[in-house]
Amino acid sequence: MKITFTKTELNSKTKIRAKLKESLSAFKDISKYYNEDEIFSLILSAIRVNELNIIEIEKIRNRTQYIVDTEKVKYWIDKRLFPNTVQISTDDKELLKLLIFSLAMPYKMLKGETKATMSEKVQRGKERDFEQIFSDTFVGKIGEIIFKQYAKQKFEREIILDWGISREIETFKSDIVNSKKVVSIKSTDTLESIWAEAPKNADYGILVKVSLPKDFLMKILAYISSLEKLLNFVKEKIQKDITASDTMDLVNFIKETAYDEQMAIKAFTCGFFKTSELTFKHKGDNLPFIGGEFEIYEDKHLIKCNELKYTKQDWNEFFKDIFV
């Protein structure tokens, strides 16, 4: 089936989803890992950069039509998305390391024991709170955990990650400790993102899109039984209080919701790129994509997802370059 869009429609997620509505269930089934919301966001990204020529662009007089071929979307899911998706559970050792690392980061910031600051990545110097720093750290580094497993599962390559927290402001070091090159692994929980980036001095950039539950910390606490201990403690303390019924209802609601399903983190390793003068972009540059344009807020390397390398041969060449 082919679905026609105008440029205006491609700038609206609501309109795109409405036109793809009948196909989303089939797309979800092919993907195997993702629900309909997740698969829509991933497909939206593929459409906006025209991965694997999902879109046919036709000009009729003064109008341009964008025709999405659903069979090509299915092909993209089958050949690009599914083979490069991995899933990790809450008992993964590297994930537990990341949990501790993320909990330690805000404390390190408060004590001035890290180069990062409480106001980093926040406009107008407003300080982030503990929970936001924890979440930013977890999301920002989880792509490294995913890629470590991806490299092991798909290519039998051992990746060593950096778990140190430095207090020195220095040039970016490689996210892969045992690499001869400077490799940046960026993760995002915005599945519709279309850009892969890397710091100015990086040799390679890797992009990982992560489907992470919004209540991921609660899911982890539920898994290790800490949440249940907290809820039982509250129940014990307030059960004799004649005004405690509403609170007890909330306790039961939290328990039912948090334990409703076990957390499994799904992630799509989109690919990698080698940095060069052509990939380097300057602050203030505007980069176009189908449906809009993107303004760059700092100097860095940046390319669209459809320009990433991802084949088995590409990855073998990558590993050969960074390890030899």
Image (cartoon, rainbow, N blue to C red):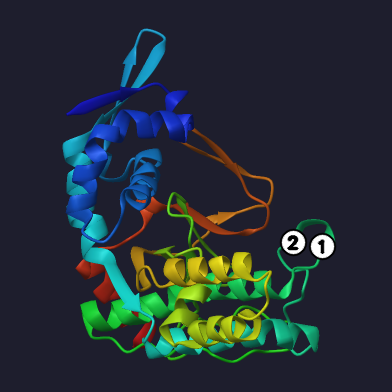
Instruction: Identify the residue shown where x is 38% and y is 76%.
Output: 146
Mark linked to residue 263: none
In the rendered image, residue 145, in percent from the top left (x then y), is placed at: 42, 80
Instruction: Identify the residue shown where x is 55% and y is 37%.
Output: 293
Instruction: Identify the residue shown where x is 59% and y is 71%.
Output: 135
In this image, 39 relative to 8: left or right? Answer: left
Residue receiving disc 1: 126
In the rendered image, residue 15, in percent from the top left (x then y), is placed at: 42, 28
Give SS at disc 2.
Answer: loop
In the rendered image, residue 305, in percent from the top left (x then y), is placed at: 40, 53
Give SS at disc 1.
Answer: loop
> Which residue is farthest top?
61
In this image, 27 relative to 43: left or right? Answer: left
Instruction: Identify the residue shown where x is 56% and y is 89%.
Output: 100
Contact, mark 2 vs mark 1 (Cβ under 8 Å): yes
> For the residue marked with disc 2, what is the amino acid?
Val
Residue 84 visible in the current orientation: yes
279 up-or-down from 8: above or below: below
In this image, 83 relative to 144: left or right? Answer: left
Residue 179 visible in the current orientation: no
- Is 14 or 286 nearer to us in this picture? 14
Residue receiving disc 2: 122
Callout count: 2
**Image quadrant occupied by the C terminus:** bottom left
In the rendered image, residue 163, in percent from the top left (x then y), is placed at: 54, 90
- Is 188 or 312 nearer to us in this picture? 188
Badge 2: residue crowd in 10 Å (few <14, some 14–19, many ≥20): few
